[in-house]
């Protein structure tokens, strides 16, 4: 069978109720978007050898959205790679993306990557730490991976581009859109420095809450190490840390996560989160998922990028906190 066209790929990529392997099975049996539009849920279940539950499945609507995505791809020159051509580390994760859409230089993600994450509400120490870490990592030739959000992501990207190095932003929406819009100029600088904007969502797909969580697994999956700058209780950065541990990757905390101002921010967030947990709006997992938990389980604390490089050469357990990996780590509770 010839390679699927972009219209069919965009349509299949939006079938979020299927795994990547199931999408591959579908493509082995369906060769055009028109044929996909005619499938019933029962047809799909037969092809993937599993009874799937896809409430509201509408193949024609999926194809209409795919036509919009394909038009944006042609207009903006957005590129894509399928699962078999993803960076090796990302291909190792159990929930590997079916495909990635990108703008810029995708080879930046085939270099040695390091992921930098943290809260949007950084303290001055956190802002300085994220920027310096991104700068030094990029200066050393690594690709700094983050999510382009306010706070730690923004500062790590800014440090990397200031160093003239590569950085990659993983988006919770189509690669045609920058979220938040205030970071359009930063996104342009990322591309100018040889980095990339990347997403598993077809162009034209908007950001939604659950897509931010799924974006975090890709941030974790692209790198052998995830560095958490600051993360109060409930922070999405700690979900990224959990994904990384579940993938057998290293998780480290920057010393800024434990400064006096960070402790004050954490206390305020803990109080607000406690009320939401008490009212049943949030699960207790978020309240209990704090940096100190990771440290007690062996995650190391580093001072800066130079200290990270030193840590790599140390015998595991030679500093307080053993290696940042947990072989028994569970996948994060997503909601």
Image (cartoon, rainbow, N blue to C red):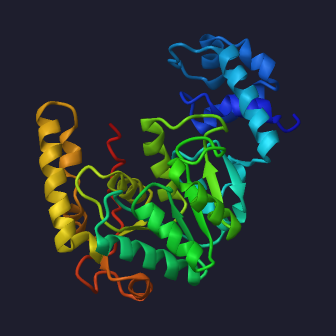
* Left or right placement of residue 103 versus residue 74 in this view: left
The x, y position of residue 306, in whole percent, is 43, 87
The x, y position of residue 334, in whole percent, is 35, 40
Q: Residue at x 83, y 34 (%)?
A: 5
In this orientation, does residue 112 appear? Answer: yes
Q: Quadrant of residue 126?
A: bottom left
Q: Residue at x 88, y 36 (%)?
A: 2
The x, y position of residue 174, in whole percent, is 62, 41
Q: How many marks?
A: 0
The front one of 283 and 74 is 74
The front one of 84 and 102 is 102
Q: Quadrant of residue 3?
A: top right
* Left or right placement of residue 307 versus residue 300 in this view: right
* Left or right placement of residue 244 versus residue 286 in this view: right
The x, y position of residue 282, in whole percent, is 22, 36
Q: Is residue 220 above or below residue 3?
A: below
Q: Residue furthest right?
A: 2
């Amino acid at each position: 069978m010839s390679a699927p066209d972009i219209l069919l790929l965009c349509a299949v990529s939006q079938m979020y109720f299927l795994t990547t392997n199931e999408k591959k099975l579908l493509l082995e049996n369906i060769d055009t978007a028109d044929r996909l539009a005619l499938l019933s849920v029962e047809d799909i279940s037969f092809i993937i050898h599993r009874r799937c539950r896809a409430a509201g499945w509408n193949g024609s609507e999926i194809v209409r959205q795919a036509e919009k995505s394909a038009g944006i791809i042609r207009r903006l020159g957005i590129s894509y790679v399928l699962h078999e051509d993803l960076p090796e580390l990302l291909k190792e994760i159990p929930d590997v993306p079916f495909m990635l859409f990108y703008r810029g230089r995708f080879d930046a993600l085939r270099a040695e990557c390091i992921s930098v994450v943290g809260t949007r509400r950084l303290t001055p120490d956190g802002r300085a730490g994220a920027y310096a870490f991104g700068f030094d990592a990029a200066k050393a030739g690594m690709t700094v991976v983050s999510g382009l959000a306010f706070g730690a992501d923004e500062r790590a990207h800014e440090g990397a581009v200031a160093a003239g190095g590569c950085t990659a932003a993983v988006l919770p929406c189509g690669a045609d859109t920058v979220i938040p819009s205030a970071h359009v100029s930063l996104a342009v600088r990322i591309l100018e420095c040889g980095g990339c904007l990347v997403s598993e969502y077809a162009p034209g797909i908007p950001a939604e809450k659950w897509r931010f969580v799924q974006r975090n697994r890709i941030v974790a999956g692209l790198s052998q190490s995830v560095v958490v700058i600051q993360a109060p209780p409930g922070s999405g950065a700690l979900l990224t840390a959990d994904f990384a541990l579940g993938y057998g990757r290293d998780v480290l905390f920057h010393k800024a996560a434990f400064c006096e101002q960070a402790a004050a921010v954490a206390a305020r967030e803990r109080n607000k989160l406690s009320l939401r947990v008490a009212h049943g709006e949030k699960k207790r997992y978020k309240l209990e998922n704090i940096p100190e938990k990771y440290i007690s389980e062996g995650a190391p604390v580093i001072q800066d990028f130079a200290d990270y490089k030193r840590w790599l050469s140390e015998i595991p357990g030679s500093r307080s906190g053993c290696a940042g990996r947990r072989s028994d780590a569970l996948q994060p509770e997503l909601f």
